[in-house]
Amino acid sequence: MAVVAEPIVETTLGKLQGTVEDEIQVFRGIPYGDSTAGAHRFLPPRPAEAWSGVRDASEFGPLCPQLGSLVGDSLGDQRTIGPLPRLPQGEDCLVLNVWTPAVGDGGKRPVLFWLHGRGYGAGAGSEGWYTGAPLAKRGDVVVVTINHRLNVYGYLHLADIGGERFAGSGVAGMLDAALALEWVRDNIESFGGDPDNVTIFGESGGGAKVSTLLAMPSAEGLFHRAVIQSGPAIRGVTPDDASQLAEQLLDQLGIGKHELDKLQALPFAQLTEAVGKLGVAAGMMRLAPVVDGSYFPAHPFDPVAATTAANVPLMIGSNKDEAALFSATDRRRRRLTEEELLERLERMLGDRRDEILDVYRSNRPDATPWDLYIGISSESTRLRSIQLAERKAAGGPAPVFMYLFAYESEYLGGLFKSCHALEIPFVFDNPDIAPFTGERPERYELAATMSRAWIAFARNGDPNYEGLARWPTYDTQTRSTMIFDVRCVVEDDPRKEERLAWKGDPVMRLRG
């Protein structure tokens, strides 16, 4: 049996030795930035320091300190999305991973640069379902995933409290992503990739990060196409709101506004615990990129698309039943009564409840109260995706392509329907990695279809390929949308009546 030599690649910082897995060369835990601990906490990232000799790149690097499944009880996630790595936490977490068919061959392959989900507060590029090997193998592309600063480490806005020294603190996690893209620009050719053909893509919080990078001048030119999966970010956090949260955290820790060096010196375990005490509503949802007027000059797509997004082709979409994932533990799941439906929708919709509900009943005559609840609760992501696509299409010449993922899994009796994040294993051409994709044989064909569309888009800025139903660009006249399902078809303005029912109403209150 032939022995495959472990690949060695020379980068601008030193040599790396990776591994070969299923004919794909893999390099893990590559440092692209220096430690962000101590006096460097909350500050813009610095490039990693060079090393001598050959650095082992066979293992994933540390996670940014966080709360949640990756560092706690992950049993629920493992039963849903598959295996999760047990990795150390730390502030020396600016690392990335590369999957490539070959190194040093001048391949000039398209590069797909993944930004992980779990909002801005948790997650890692090393999660099992993000493995890039199947995608790299199917499409002859290079896949990159990254870790970056999260929650308080990446988005605590201190510039209005601590002055110029802390400029960029409210968007530090996104500056990390921009630094990782600089690493790709400077090194990916050695890994068989094309630095002039980089596609950023991400789901949920990762899609929001893509939205943000489209509006950041420091990232302009470092990527050339973008994909937003169930994560449209129309606006960032305002400085006033962000400063209020920072003051709340300082008060909780007993640290004065002129003692920010104490905040930097605090052990990360203590700081992470303090973030958890802020609670989701008060803290985690607001620890997100801050529109500081400099690094992040304006809201990405409000009132119009950022000018830096004008020439970047975009693919964007959502899943039909986004809220089914978040409602899977609801004690009334699939047993919701008519009365309970009305009570919940009144809290969501107020005096518009009956008007909106009537439209959904008419469009979905066989829907149960639970089905209607999930359908209406899921609309925020779809409607904001449409809003973003409209503004992007109006903001420049680059094309926009819209999709709706409608494939329903039969896992646990169909509990997850076509839920949030279900498309990820299909995009990565790895449908067996996550239990919640189910066991229907059609999932393999759908994974091939979707991964090939993403690969075509990365290669050409157009997801069309031979064998796929023609997928036109999106505009406000036809609203052409690819429906990804057992049978993939294009529909013009799907579920039009439901879209129009909102009459421009804000949809942010629809959180499921």
Image (cartoon, grey):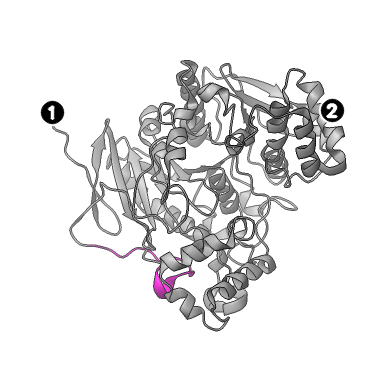
The residue that label 1 is drawn on is: 2
Give me the residue at 75% from left, 34% from top. 340
Q: Which residues are magenta?
A: 37-51
Residue beneath disc 2: 358
At 46% from the left edge and 38% from the top edge, which residue is drawn? 76
Q: Is residue 470 left or right of residue 336?
A: left
Q: Main secondary structure of the magenta part?
A: loop
Q: Is residue 77 left or right of residue 3?
A: right
Image spot of residue 487 (x, y percent): 58, 16
> Mark 2: few, some, or many residues within 10 Å (few <14, many ≥20)?
few
Nearest-to-viewer mark from 2 and 1:
2
Secondary structure beneath dot 1 equals: loop
Rendering coords of residue 292 (x, y %)? 63, 66
Mark 2 residue element:
helix
- Report if residue 42 lies within the magenta region: yes
Give x and y (percent) for residue 420. Answer: 58, 36
Q: Which mark is residue 268?
A: none
Q: Residues within 10 Å of mark 1 (few under 14, many from 20)?
A: few
Amino acid at circle 1: Ala
